[in-house]
Amino acid sequence: MSQTWTAIRLAALRTVRDPLALLVALAFYAVVASVISTLWRSAAHGHGGTIAGYSAGQLTWYLYVAEAAVTALNPRQIELTGEDIATGAVSVELLRPASVVGLRIATELGRCLPRLALFSVIGGGLAWWAGGAPVRPDGLLLAVPSLLLAVVCNLAAQHAVAAAAFWIRDARSAWFLYQKLVFVLGAMLIPVELLPGWLAATARVLPFTSMAYAPARLAAGHVEPHLLVLQVFWAGVLLVAAAAAFAAGERRLQVVGG
């Protein structure tokens, strides 16, 4: 546990010590979130003020928070982790007396926490300015732990998918597919309620909604604590899946060499 906290702390410090990279990431987030929220806000105004139970202001808060939950992470994490597996970098890490995947997830969590905090503060200010005050401040408070759980779910899933590189050596195609699933089934670009019925039903039983939809819906004023419970469940499942996938991959390396 001490190694995990150390990895998180050191990674967070490295991120903070590179303010230029933080500013570039913030600019990208602010531009993308502002453009998308403006489009949906206009659509809401054109449909009598609400769409699928979301007012223009609620959609603004939803999209700023959903974008923060996803863009705070390295978008190419699956590809980069797959490259480390394929090139043998992970084989060297196996010599450490600690969980390889555990330390990797902790390190990535530490790297994204400063970005997530910055995006949340700036994004919250922009959402308030563009869409008005939050409809339910208690929902916004619930969105804070929900954002953290969203990041944990996403990182765990990314490492579980990247573990495919132990067998196929190239995780780039898996990264491309995963990213699109988060965008659509995770409801980063559009709330689940606006998806076609069959697709919305599919999204609700998959873990992707825990990565963007849950904190965004809470911040939009839909106070549904069960979303946090669902996130905790998926975080546990995905962390176990990532650990199991890496354990199987490590055994394969020991058998075939690498």
Image: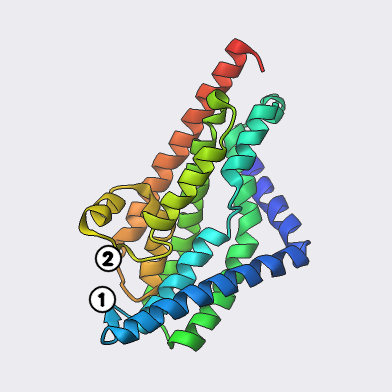
The C terminus appears in which quarter of the rendering? top right
Asked whether, in this view, residue 34 is left or right of residue 216, the answer is: right
Asked whether disc 1 touches disc 2, contact meaning CB atoms under 8 Å apart, the reply is: yes
Q: In front: 114, or 76?
A: 76
Three-letter amino acid code of the residue under disc 2: Glu
In front of the other: 157 or 197: 197
Mark 1 and mark 2 lie on one chain; the one further toward the N terminus is 1
In what element is the residue under mark 1?
loop
What residue is shown with label 2?
A: 193
The residue sitting at 40% across, 81% down in the picture is 41
Mark number, residue 53:
1
Q: Where is residue 88 in the image (x, y as percent from the top left)?
A: 69, 26
Q: Quadrant of residue 105?
A: top right
Residue 72 location in percent, x, y? Answer: 58, 60
Colour convention of the picture: rainbow
All told, the count of numbered labels is: 2
Q: Image height check: is 191 above or below 246?
A: below
User: Could you tell me which residue is drawn at 31 percent across and 64 percent down?
Assistant: 225
Cα gap from disc 1 to disc 2, whole angstroms: 8 Å
Residue 213 in percent (x, y) is at 38, 62
- Taking the spot 27% from the left edge, 83% from the top edge, the residue there is 47
Instruction: Please tell me the numbered disc located at residue 250.
Output: none
Q: Can residue 96 be seen in this view?
A: no
Q: Which residue is drawn at 25% across and 76% down?
A: 53
The N terminus, quarter of image: top right
Which amino acid is tagged 1?
Gly
Give coordinates of residue 9: x percent, y percent. Answer: 68, 53
